Amino acid sequence: MRFHRTRIFILEQGHEVTIATRGKTPDSYGDKVERITIQRTNEESMREALQGKHFDVVIDKIAYCSNDIRYVMDYVDCDKYIYMSSTSVYNPKHMNTVESDFDGYSKDFVWCDRKEFPYEQIKRQAEYALWQKYPGKNWIAVRYPFAIGKDDYTKRLLFYVEHVIKSEPMYIDNIDYQMSYIRSDEAGEFIAYLVDKDVKGAINGSASETISLREVINYIEEKTGKCAALSEQGEAAPYNGEPEYSINTDKAEKTGYRFSNFKRLDI
């Protein structure tokens, strides 16, 4: 997920910004930012790029596994580390899911790479690394549900839009479940908002209301004039298997941040 608004928001606040990427994708910031070239999954590359440097805040949106966490925390000197985690760490998610529903000390920790376990497990191991191996560091784990918006590279929401427009059959096993989402640009903005806030540990981020896929499909039908084709023989939808759940954002709101009401968003 590209969170362009994170950088824009931070630059607008007058902060000095350094971008760490592979250097393959150009950006539009010109001389407004510094740049570091890294290979994110290569420990030696991370050590050479980060060792000996100090940053007030490090925002890490591409750490997936415990080794990704280690390659930053062992080599960079920073006052605060903000990690973009996921609500997939909760097992299971449920209505009114709160931060304490995931215990970072409850399970055995292992150092692992991205392909060693399913997504949910490697994200849990990434957080286990923070909780169990770096308890003395000043870090924040921002837990987001599915991000939806113009820069959602997963195109999961687009699946439903295209299937309705083309009248292609799709199979949805949780059409009436209420679920939480977050707008992708707001996800980037909230991370930037936390840069100078006195927050530690895990914090949830989510739109302020849940919505069902039936409501989403009804909206698509209304806007397009098309009718969804629902069938058990249709193509399996990307959000299948998700339980009914909501994400509690009381901790975030106590900092003064207010998330958008998802049912009023024009995404």
Image (tube, rainbow, N blue to C red):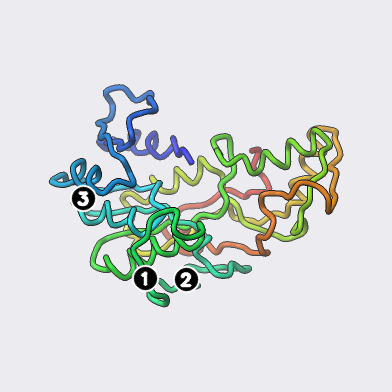
The three-letter amino acid code for the residue at tag 2 is Phe
Quarter location, residue 50: top left
Sequence-first disc among 2 and 3: 3
Q: Position of residue 171 (x, y in %)?
A: 78, 51
The three-letter amino acid code for the residue at tag 3 is Val
Q: Position of residue 248 (x, y in %)?
A: 55, 64
Marks 2 and 3, how far apart at CA: 27 Å
Q: Residue at x 25, y 45 (%)?
A: 46
Tell me the SS state at disc 3.
loop
Q: Residue at x 61, y 39 (%)?
A: 155
Task: Please give left or right for residue 114 compared with residue 31 in the image.
Answer: right
Query: Is disc 2 surrounded by few (<14), some (14 to 19) or many (20+) residues within 10 Å?
Result: some
Tell me the number on the disc at residue 237.
Answer: none
Residue topped by disc 1: 109
Tell me the number on the disc at residue 102.
Answer: 2
Marks 1 and 3, how far apart at CA: 22 Å
Residue topped by disc 3: 76
Sequence-first disc among 1 and 3: 3
Answer above or below: position of 89 versus 30. Answer: below
The three-letter amino acid code for the residue at tag 1 is Phe
Most foreground residue, 171 or 195: 171
Q: Are marks 2 and 3 in contact (CB under 8 Å)?
A: no
Tell me the SS state at disc 2.
loop
Query: Is disc 1 surrounded by few (<14), some (14 to 19) or many (20+) residues within 10 Å?
Result: some
Q: Position of residue 215 (x, y in %)?
A: 76, 50
Q: Residue at x 34, y 68 (%)?
A: 131
Q: Of tags 1 and 2, which is closer to the observer?
A: 1
Task: Please give left or right for residue 71 compared with residue 172 in the image.
Answer: left
Furthest-bottom residue in this view: 106
